[in-house]
Image: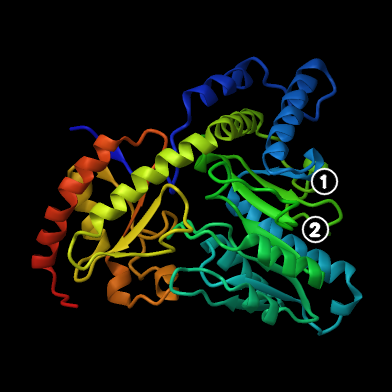
């Protein structure tokens, strides 16, 4: 049985061109970038070249790119780093006058948990609502900002429902108010254009394994002048911002993946959007099916739908029996039995959120696979509806 992978939002296969670029850095060019001898300098050159490639994609300067192990680490560094630096450097917050951070109600769990940790440590957190499409209203951002606000963090595009947020408008408001603006671009990096200057972004998170690079590499863009405190201390790598021996093979792979995405972004985006729209049209023919997220302003590879009266987990298991891999909710939390807080935030009832299905397409997705999926899905949905104790 042929296996079909429709879970590219969770992770992507490493592109063979990326793997080939990485191979020498495991056993031939294996030096430590902090070493002064030729082995170390060879690795350092690869690191510098990779930094330039990644900076170029988002119109940043190479020294503004900090390499990390993952998007989770980058998001933790962004929120905690800014918060701790502010408490240390800003005299307004040396006493009991606590700094304020604004996030959206549909952020990735690593943002949510970082914010929760900061709240326990005396920082004030505001979670912004979203509309029925998962879109943050820039006016809500403006209203939420106070004299104590130090940071706003709103994801560029939702990992769950694919909605693209009005980042440029939000960034402009933050810049005018003198507040740092961070965006988690893990899902959008390499898929849609990003310009940190035009979009008024101060900090940006990206992840290698979401764009056909290896796991174990991420980045945090930090605009020059932004005050941020490291959360890892040691040998002073990454300009003192992220101590740890640098994962050169993964970073070289990250850069090669970025290079490929940059060259193919426009063409691949058009191809995926056509497949996405065909799939959405077919799925919505199923009685009761509902599209979640913005119907137009969404990532080219994301489809999120919900079906009344069925369990998303059962849907995933039955699809897997037909060789099709999808997910329900975000991959980091899809094993949990609670309904997705993202779907609840856009107004779905818990019963509706439990019947959600995320289908994310990628470089290897074909029209034939879409056809097979649309043939199989209605049968499974009908079967599960008959078995379900829920009747919406």
Front residue (pair 149, 249): 149
Indicate left or right for 50 with 214 as reference: right
Figure quadrant of the N terminus: top left
Percent of width and height locating residue 47: 73, 30
Helix, strand or loop for disc 2 = loop
Percent of width and height locating residue 342: 44, 68
Q: Measured along the vertical axis of the image, is residue 97 above or below residue 15?
A: below
Task: Tell me how the rendering is colored.
Answer: rainbow
Percent of width and height locating residue 367: 29, 37
Q: Measured along the vertical axis of the image, is residue 301 above or below residue 111?
A: above
Disc 2 to disc 1, C-alpha distance: 9 Å
Q: Residues within 10 Å of mark 1 (few under 14, many from 20)?
A: some
Q: Which residue is under mark 2?
A: 229
Q: Which residue is under mark 1?
A: 240
The answer, for residue 356, to whether it is visible in the render is no
Indicate left or right for 163 with 195 as reference: left
Q: Residue at x 78, y 41 (%)?
A: 238
The answer, for residue 208, to whether it is visible in the render is yes
Q: Residue furthest bottom?
A: 96
Q: Residue at x 68, y 80 (%)?
A: 144
Count of numbered circles in the view:
2
Front residue (pair 233, 392): 392
Q: Which mark is residue 303?
A: none
């Amino acid at each position: 049985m042929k296996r079909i992978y429709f879970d590219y939002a969770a992770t992507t296969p490493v592109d063979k061109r990326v793997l080939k670029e990485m191979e020498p850095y495991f056993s031939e060019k294996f030096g430590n970038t902090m070493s002064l001898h030729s082995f170390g300098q060879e690795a350092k050159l690869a690191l510098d070249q990779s930094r330039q490639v990644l900076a170029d994609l988002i119109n940043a300067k190479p020294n503004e790119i900090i390499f990390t192990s993952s998007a989770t680490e980058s998001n933790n560094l962004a929120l905690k780093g800014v918060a701790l630096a502010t408490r240390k450097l800003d005299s307004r917050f040396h006493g009991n006058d606590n700094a304020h951070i604004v996030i959206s109600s549909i952020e990735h769990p690593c943002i949510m948990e970082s914010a929760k940790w900061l709240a326990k440590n005396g920082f004030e957190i505001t979670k912004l609502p979203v509309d029925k499409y998962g879109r943050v209203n820039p006016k809500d951002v403006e209203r939420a900002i106070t004299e104590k606000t130090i940071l706003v963090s709103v994801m560029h595009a939702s990992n769950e429902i694919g909605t693209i947020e009005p980042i440029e408008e939000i960034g402009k408001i933050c810049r005018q108010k003198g507040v740092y603006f961070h965006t988690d671009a893990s899902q959008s990096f390499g898929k849609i254009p990003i310009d940190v200057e035009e979009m008024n972004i101060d900090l940006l998170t990206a992840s290698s394994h979401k764009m056909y690079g290896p796991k174990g590499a991420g980045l945090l863009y930090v605009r020059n002048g932004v005050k941020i405190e490291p959360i890892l201390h040691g040998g002073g790598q990454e300009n003192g911002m992220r101590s740890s021996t640098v994962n050169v093979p993964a970073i070289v792979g990250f850069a090669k993946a970025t290079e490929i995405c940059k060259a193919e972004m426009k063409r691949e985006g058009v191809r995926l959007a056509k497949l996405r729209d065909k799939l959405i049209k077919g799925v919505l023919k199923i009685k009761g099916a509902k599209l979640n997220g913005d119907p137009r302003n969404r990532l080219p590879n994301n489809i999120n739908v919900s079906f009344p009266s069925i369990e998303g987990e059962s849907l995933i298991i039955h699809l897997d029996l037909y060789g099709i891999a999808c997910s329900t909710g975000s991959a980091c939390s899809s094993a949990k039995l609670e309904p997705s807080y993202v779907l609840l935030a856009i107004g779905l009832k818990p019963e509706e959120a439990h019947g959600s299905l995320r289908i994310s397409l990628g470089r290897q997705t074909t029209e034939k696979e879409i056809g097979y999926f649309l043939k199989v899905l209605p049968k499974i949905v009908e079967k599960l509806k008959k078995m379900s104790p829920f009747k919406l």
